[in-house]
Image (cartoon, rainbow, N blue to C red):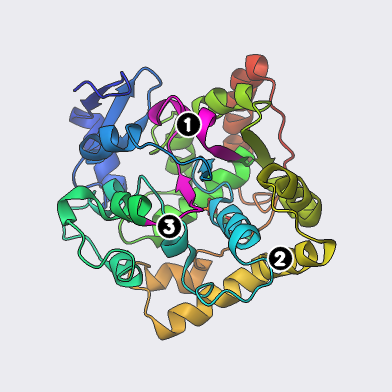
Amino acid sequence: MRLASGHVAVQLHGEELAKIQRDFAGFGKGLVRLTPGGWVLPGPFTKYADKIYNTKFHEGDVVIMTYPKCGTTWTQEVVWTMRNNPNLDHPKASIPIKARSPFIDSDMLMHMGKGAPRNELLEMVRDILPDPDPDKGIALQLTANLPDPRTIKTHLPLSLMTPDLLDTAKVIYVARNPKDVVLSFLHHCRLMKSVDYVGSLEQYVDYFVQDQLIYGPYWEHLREAWPQRDHPNMHFLFYEDMKANPKAEMKKLDRFLGTNLTEEQLEKIAHYTSFEEMKKRDEDYYEKNANKGLKQEVKTKEGGFYRKGEAGSWKGRLTEMQEAKIDDWTKKNTVELGIKFKYSV
Ligand code: A3P
């Protein structure tokens, strides 16, 4: 199937699909791989791909673009707060970030399993979307109906978004070192009922370095964004730098976004968006509103969405062999790209 972006999507099949579906019970509707790029995405992506690609952005939009688990939620909260809640008194600030900052490509994730999709998001956004058309994608309609200024999340790479994205909107690309990403992503895939990963860490590392995880290839994602890092509408941000000095990174964001916040406001926002504070607010919210999307046994044992929030927590968790696999793969992919990660702070 040819997409508006020019990519051709082919369904995964045979032993490759059977193996993935044994390990990821949630991918009931299969997966597709796109050419060029080798992008792996849930089967329902093809239903929404052209709508996403043809989305016209507004001048004041900020798009937060990341490979999964690179600090998307953190950056969303930072950016949304800087733009909408600089004095920390916004009445809607306690609603989960996904309702304030839409995840434009999440409709395919809501529909990738065999069962009926959960409508938790819909409940949160009734005021903006009182009468949505379920066939048109809840996230897409939320994005379209959200008042300006919009802060939009995507895990898609640049080539699957409108080609004039950077001419219109501002993009914040967040990157994180692959060793922390692989462990964070593994945890996420075990935790989310909708993904239901039942394989081992060993297998997961193999899926990662063989570019078989959704939204990958990881390096290709970076390869599209990194050369754009000096574009005036692109801000490139490393998770590790935010962790080392959140206020310094927020000052750079302040200049990029033109928010003109005071030192005191930035100081308070840095505290408000710290791992501990965001985790606490999430727990408070879900204490009152049961989070039915998480596997409780995984949450109890390994933690919830807010797992560790560190740079370098991979240390001691990967075997020598797993580390070597990631190091070799990194070396091979960074020769030309020239990007360098910090692996701890
Ligand atoms: P860990 O699993 O390593 O803890 P994403 O939002 O892209 O899915 O990324 C999730 C990762 O960011 C998780 O990493 C999560 O704990 C971490 N994270 C979320 N909020 C954070 C914060 N305020 N500060 C630091 N890390 C945060």
* Residue at 38% from the left image edge and 36% from the top image edge: 56
Q: Is residue 29 left or right of residue 188?
A: left
Q: Amino acid at mark 2?
A: Ile
The answer to whether one can see residue 11 in this image is yes
Q: Amino acid at mark 1?
A: Leu
> Total of numbered circles in the picture?
3
**Disc 1 packing (10 Å; few <14; some 14–19; many ≥20):** many
Provide the residue designation for mark 3: 147
SS of the residue at dot 1? helix
Seen from this angle, which residue lies furthest top? Answer: 336
Is 200 above or below relative to 267?
Answer: above
Q: Is residue 171 magenta?
A: yes
The answer to whether one can see residue 344 in this image is no
Give the magenta-colored segment's residue range.
Answer: 146-173
Q: Amino acid at mark 3?
A: Pro
SS of the residue at dot 3? loop
Q: Is residue 113 left or right of residue 306?
A: left
* Residue at 53% from the left image edge and 28% from the top image edge: 167
Dividing the picture into quadrants, the one containing residue 36 is top left
Q: Is residue 315 left or right of residue 126?
A: right
SS of the residue at dot 2? helix
Residue 113 point in image, percent of width and height: 21, 52
Comparing 194 with 146, the one in front is 146
Provide the residue designation for mark 1: 165
Of the two numbered discs 3 and 1 in the rendering, the one whose residue sits closer to the viewer = 3
Q: Is residue 236 left or right of residue 65?
A: right
